[in-house]
Image (cartoon, coloured by chain):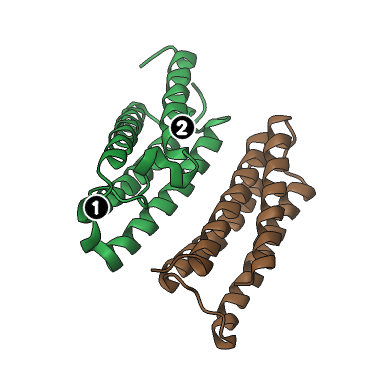
C-alpha cells in the first residue's frame, strides 16, 4: 500500500466512520445528561451508556487511523459493541428497572433505530473485507 | 417548539437525506443540490434555535427537560456543517452518502426533540 491513508477509512468505510461519529456524539452526550440529572434512577445502565459512548469514540478514531494496532483496536471496540448491544438488549427486556428504555443499547438499540445493533455487524464485515483486500494482517 | 415547523423540518431532512444516500450509491459526487439541501436543513435548525429561544417567553415551554432538549439542538446544529465540510474537502460519492446520513440524523434528532418538548412529562 503506497497510500498514506488508512485502508479502513477508504471508500464506504468513510460512511461507516461518519455514522460512528454521530453515534459517538449522541450516546456520549445523552449518557452525560442522564448521569448529571437522574443518575440515581439507574446508575448501572447510565454508566454503561457512557462506556458505550466512549467505545463509539474509540471505534471512530480507530477506523480513521491506519496501521495494524488501530485495526486491532477497531476490532476489539466493535466486538465489544456487538456483545454489549446483545447482552444489554436481552437484559433490558428481562429487567426494565436495571436497564430502563432510554439507554443506547436497551431493546437492542430500538431508540436509535436499531443502528447500535446493525453498526457493529456492518463494521465487522467492513474490517473483514479490508483484511481480505489487503491480504495481510 | 411549534409542531408544524417540526414536521417541515423532519420531512425536508428525510427527503434531503434519502435523496443524497441514493445519489451517493449512484456514484454522484457532492454537488450544489446535495450540499444545498444539507445547508437548508442547517438553516431550518437555526430557525428552530431562534424559535426555541423565543418560545418560552410566549408561554410555549418544554414539557420535558430543557437541558436535554438543548443538548440535542446544539449537537444537531454541529452535524450538517461538518458533513458539508467533508463533502467540500473530499469530492467522491461517499461524501454524498455522508451528507445523506447527516440529514437523516437531523430528522431523528428533531423528532426526538419534539418528543422532549411536547410529550415527555419528566
Q: Is residue A133 left or right of residue B18?
A: left
Which chain is rendered brown in the image?
Answer: B
Pointer 1 local density, CA inside 10 Å: few below 14, some 14–19, many at least 20: some
Please report contact status of discs 1 and 2: CB closer than 8 Å, yes or no.
no
Question: Which chain letter goes with mark 2?
Answer: A
Q: Is residue B14 above or below residue A132?
A: below
Q: Quadrant of residue B122?
A: bottom left
- Of the numbered discs 1 and 2, the one sitting upstream in the chain is 1
Q: Secondary structure at mark 1?
A: helix
Q: Please tell me whether residue B6 is drawn above or below residue A102 in the rendered image.
A: below
**Left or right: where A123 falls relative to B23:** left
List x then y, in percent, for residue A119.
45, 34
Q: Residue tagged by mark 2? A: A118
Q: Position of residue B120 (x, y in %)?
A: 45, 65
Q: Secondary structure at mark 2?
A: helix
**On screen, residue B100 above or below B119:** above
Say if residue A105 shows up in the picture.
Answer: no
Q: What residue is shown at x 22% (from left), y 48% (from top)?
A: A98
Say if labels 1 and 2 share a chain.
Answer: yes
**Residue furthest out toward the right:** B32
Front-lying residue, B30 or B119:
B119
Splitting the image into 4 quarters, where does residue A29 fall? bottom left
- Label for residue A47? 1
Amino acid at each position: 500500500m503506497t497510500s498514506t491513508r488508512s485502508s479502513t477509512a477508504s471508500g464506504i468505510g468513510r460512511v461507516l466512520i461518519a455514522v460512528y461519529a454521530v453515534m459517538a456524539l449522541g450516546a456520549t452526550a445523552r449518557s452525560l445528561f442522564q448521569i448529571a440529572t437522574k443518575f440515581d434512577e439507574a446508575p448501572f445502565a447510565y454508566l454503561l451508556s457512557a462506556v458505550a459512548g466512549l467505545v463509539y469514540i474509540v471505534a471512530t478514531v480507530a477506523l480513521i487511523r491506519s496501521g495494524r494496532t488501530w485495526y486491532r483496536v477497531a476490532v476489539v471496540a466493535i466486538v465489544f459493541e456487538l456483545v454489549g448491544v446483545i447482552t444489554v438488549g436481552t437484559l433490558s427486556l428481562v429487567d426494565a428497572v436495571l436497564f430502563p428504555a432510554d439507554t443506547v443499547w436497551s431493546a437492542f438499540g430500538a431508540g436509535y433505530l436499531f443502528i447500535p445493533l446493525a453498526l457493529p455487524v456492518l463494521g465487522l464485515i467492513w474490517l473483514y473485507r479490508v483484511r481480505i483486500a489487503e491480504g495481510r494482517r | 417548539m411549534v409542531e408544524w415547523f417540526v414536521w417541515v423540518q423532519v420531512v425536508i431532512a428525510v427527503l434531503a437525506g434519502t435523496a443524497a444516500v441514493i445519489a451517493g450509491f449512484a456514484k454522484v459526487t457532492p454537488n450544489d443540490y446535495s450540499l444545498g439541501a444539507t445547508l437548508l436543513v442547517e438553516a431550518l435548525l437555526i430557525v428552530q434555535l431562534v424559535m426555541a429561544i423565543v418560545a418560552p417567553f410566549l408561554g410555549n415551554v418544554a414539557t420535558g427537560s430543557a437541558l436535554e432538549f438543548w443538548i440535542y439542538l446544539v449537537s444537531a446544529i454541529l452535524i450538517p456543517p461538518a458533513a458539508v465540510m467533508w463533502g467540500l474537502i473530499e469530492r467522491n460519492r461517499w461524501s454524498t452518502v455522508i451528507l445523506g446520513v447527516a440529514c437523516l440524523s437531523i430528522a431523528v434528532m428533531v423528532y426526538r426533540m419534539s418528543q422532549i418538548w411536547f410529550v415527555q412529562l419528566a
